[in-house]
Image: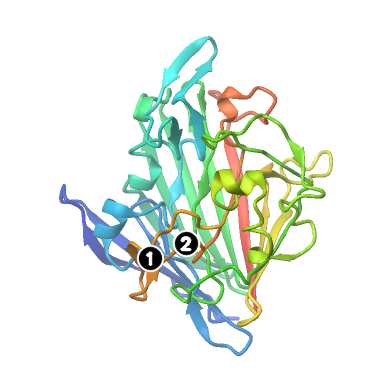
Amino acid sequence: MPIPAAPAATYFGTLPDGRTVAAYRLTNPLGMAVTVLTYGGILQTIEVPDRGGEVRNVALGFGRLDDYVERSPYFGAIIGRVANRIADGRFELDGVTYSVPVNDPPSSVHGGTHGFHTKVWAAHAWADPSGASVRLTYVSPDGDQGFPGTLHTEVTYHLAAESNTLRFTYRATTDRTTVVNLTNHSYLNLAGEGSGSVLDHEVQIWADRYLPLRPDLIPTGELAPVAGTPMDFTTPHRLGERIRCGFEQLVVARGYDHNYALDRPAGSERRLVRAARLHEPGSGRCVEVWTTEPGIDFYSGNFLDGTLVGTGGRAYRQGDGLAIEPEHFSNSPNTPHFPSIVLRPGEVYESTTEFRFSP
């Protein structure tokens, strides 16, 4: 199989402060392609064939940089330093209390007001027989959004040559004890971006426990069984099958917006395990999500309200996209019995996720 062409940078836009943003397009011989922006490390498009070979973009996003800067609900972005929520914007680390921006009262969410989704990342792209890659790097200074330590972060997107697999590899080091929980926040619609509701998507999640939420969307700390509830996706279910059933947790979150604790065999903490599978019956497109993370956040696009117009020129309404975000659990810094997200000097934060697409 021929070596894919090395992705080249193209101009995507200019920020208000004059910095330019580049786009990198990764392709493979099977017809799949992804576009990565240096602003926020955003996956702008994910183009995948269906069962008949028709290629469509399945990632929600924008065609203009201004929309990402001014109004994006994290479409396709790298999330950090800490994905999901920190209650009251405060946490304690080694006896010191730190405050981070409360940008979704009463919580800090997705790294704060100016989290990694707003940064311009340096990029290096290449191709080899295994596929096409782009590595993004960013140095977050000590005190950035209130977090301690200078954090050196690398995120690599790799599109395989011999399968429609998109791999995300995260790596970070610090010079001072800090907290880190990185993920990607792509919204997917396997029928195609802008095609309407995802409620007919079939969902399976390999988790027999989930994290119930308080009314402020902070986990209660319980890892509750999914059995006997509409939170149970241990076997495939159509997303819309139970989303309006009146179950208290679905009312609290306006749908699904919950962490799931993945079923991991003992000793598998650094191994890829299957986390979730999405299937769209009309197109036949499927994606399996594999990760080294202990959990995923499953979000059914509850707060899309028709005010955002995507790359295809169509408005996004509630339930027009869904997100599977491999990560450590929400509010981990304030919940000692959750898996730790503490990173200390001399340690390396490493995490890998794969989206394995098939028709």
Few, some or many C-alpha atoms within 10 Å of disc 1 (few <14, some 14-19, many ≥20)?
many
The residue positioned 83% from the left and 44% from the top of the image is 265
Image quadrant assignment for residue 114: top left
The answer to whether 12 appears left or right of 267 in the picture is: left
Residue on which disc 2 sits: 318
Few, some or many C-alpha atoms within 10 Å of disc 2 (few <14, some 14-19, many ≥20)?
some
The mark lying in front, picked from 2 and 1, is: 2
Examine the rendered structure and indicate whether residue 238 appears above or below residue 336: below
How far from the left and from the top, in percent, is residue 331?
56, 31
How far from the left and from the top, in percent, is residue 252?
57, 43
Q: Secondary structure at mark 2?
A: loop
How far from the left and from the top, in percent, is residue 273?
74, 52
Examine the rendered structure and indicate whether residue 7 appears above or below residue 185: below
The residue positioned 45% from the left and 40% from the top of the image is 110
Residue 279, can we see it? yes
Residue on which disc 1 sits: 24
Quadrant in the picture for the C terminus:
bottom right
Looking at the image, which residue sits at the far front?
Answer: 246
The residue positioned 82% from the left and 48% from the top of the image is 227
How far from the left and from the top, in percent, is residue 159?
54, 66
Q: Which mark is residue 349?
A: none
Looking at the image, which residue sits at the far right?
Answer: 266
- Identify residue type, mark 1: Tyr
- Identify residue type, mark 2: Gln
Q: Secondary structure at mark 1?
A: strand
